[in-house]
Image (cartoon, rainbow, N blue to C red):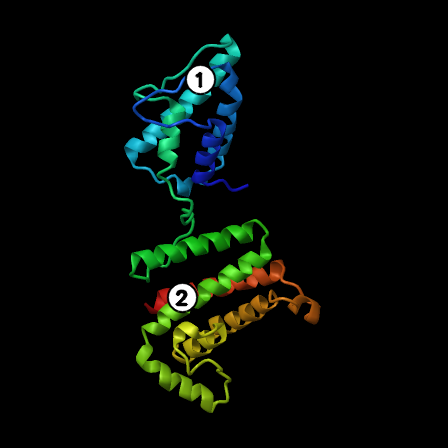
Amino acid sequence: MRVVPSDVVEQIERLFPNTKFDLSKKLQFFMGHRSFFSVILELVDLIPEELITFGTDDFSAYQTAIASMRSQIGVWDMQGDQSFDTTPGYSTDPVTLLHSLLSKCPDEAAASSTAGLDFISDEIQRQILRIDKSDADRALSNGEWKAATVLAGSIIEALLLWAIFKRAADIPGAVGVLQKRNVNLPRANRAPEEWHLHEFIEVSAELKIIGDTTAAQCRLAKGFRNLIHPGAEIRRAERCGRPEALGSAAALEHVIRDLSSRS
């Protein structure tokens, strides 16, 4: 189960309807709020660490709010009902503090384990692709074979488009050579932004942006992704499963390796 910061913010607001969360004030809680605290803390534990994007001060406040809520559950269990509104070191209660802090966090970010793509100099573009790569890795880990296959193919397209743009002056010559070899490129006369994966693979291979092994793996990934088109699994009596998802992930890793080494 994947929980993002906005999920927890929404749940807090659902548990405390018609409440204005104001950092300058304190909400009061009693024994009846024990289950509310438990739900909030369970959800917080499910937030991926890469989405907790605080600086040092906010992270300290975040940890203090969580610790205060956990401690108060223990107090209620041992001593029974009593009021509670304290976050040590802060002028507000822990629920309001937690609500404020999580409202600052993104719902998307690349996992800390998703490295690479340093060859892309544009920071925004690099971060977007790292998030997509993280999502593809997560889908693969979760056994979401179709999602992993589609995401990997889309990232390959984006990376090859990025690389081809850097060789824009060489595109007509490469297309001409491929056409003389009777390589079918139905969209080659369009702008690269309108190409499909097939054109990206063949032109990138001709320009030596990717190597022969990578091109071969990408052609397999293109075929795997085509299985997902409506009716394709029925017509071909094939399905997109774990082998296809792993093959697409391998193609993506090949592309990243080649672009890294050639940049």
Q: Nearer the viewer, residue 34 or 240?
A: 34
The residue labelled by disc 2 is: 159
Q: Residue at x 50, y 8 (%)?
A: 79
Between disc 2 and disc 1, whose residue precedes?
1
**Residue 130 horizontal side relative to residue 169, left or right:** right
Q: Residue at x 41, y 63 (%)?
A: 256
- Kindly report the distance in space between the C-alpha atoms of the residues bearing marks 2 and 1: 52 Å
**Would you say residue 158 is visible in this rendering?**
yes
Residue 210 can be seen, yes or no: no
> Callout 1: 10 Å neighbours few (<14), some, many (20+)?
some
Q: Amino acid at mark 1?
A: Phe
* Residue bearing mark 1: 29
Kind of residue at disc 2: Leu
Residue at horizontal 47 percent and vertical 15 percent from the top: 30
In the picture, residue 119 is in which quadrant? bottom left
Q: Secondary structure at mark 1?
A: loop
| 192 versus 34 height, above or below | below
- Give coordinates of residue 129: x percent, y percent: 40, 58
Q: Residue at x 63, y 59 (%)?
A: 241
Where the C terminus falls, by quadrant? bottom left
Question: Which image quadrant is residue 87 in?
Answer: top left
Q: Residue furthest top?
A: 79
Q: Residues within 10 Å of mark 2 (few under 14, many from 20)?
A: many
Above or below residue 157? Residue 104 is above
Please count the marks in the image.
2
